[in-house]
Amino acid sequence: YQYLSRYKQNKNLDHFTFTPGSIEGTERECLACLMEFCGRSSPSWTELSNFTHFLNFQLQKCEKSFFCSRVVGKEFKGF
């Protein structure tokens, strides 16, 4: 949710890292955001669950990737 809400607000995600346990927004805002980005007009709970698990997996890999690190970002501006 934290990445999606920042993306929706056109914030720079290059220096954002998820902090487990940090709470932002309400349950209603989170659900509305997930439903918006899920890609389904009326997703089931299973579809939302699969979407969040997939997104979480991809974002964890991205945060750990050397190619998404601040060091590489400084060297290759514009990517």
Image (cartoon, rainbow, N blue to C red):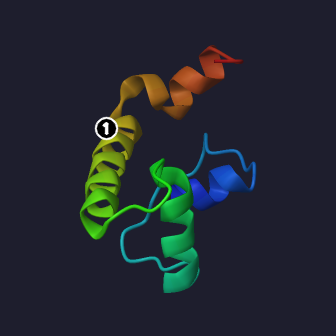
Classify residue 75 by image quadrant: top right
Q: Quadrant of the C terminus?
A: top right
Q: Where is residue 55 shown, x and y percent of the image?
A: 36, 48
State the residue at coordinates (39%, 36%).
62
Which residue occupies the extreme right position in the image?
10
Q: Where is residue 2 shown, x and y percent of the image?
A: 53, 63
User: What residue did someone put label 1 on?
Assistant: 61
Using the image, determine if residue 59 lies above or below residue 62.
below
Which residue occupies the extreme front position in the image?
42
State the residue at coordinates (58%, 77%).
29
Identify which residue, 76 or 30, lies in the foreground. Answer: 30
Question: Element type at marker 1?
Answer: helix
Residue density around tag 1, few if under 14, some if 14–19, many if 20 or more, within 10 Å: few
Q: Is residue 65 visible?
A: yes
Q: Is residue 36 left or right of residue 52?
A: right
Q: Is residue 1 visible?
A: no
Classify residue 3 by image quadrant: bottom right
Q: Where is residue 23 shown, x and y percent of the image?
A: 48, 80
Using the image, determine if residue 55 lies above or below residue 25.
above
Q: Is residue 31 left or right of residue 73?
A: left
Using the image, determine if residue 61 lies above or below residue 32.
above
State the residue at coordinates (49%, 62%).
35
The kind of residue on which mark 1 rests is Lys
Q: Where is residue 67 shown, x and y percent of the image?
A: 44, 22
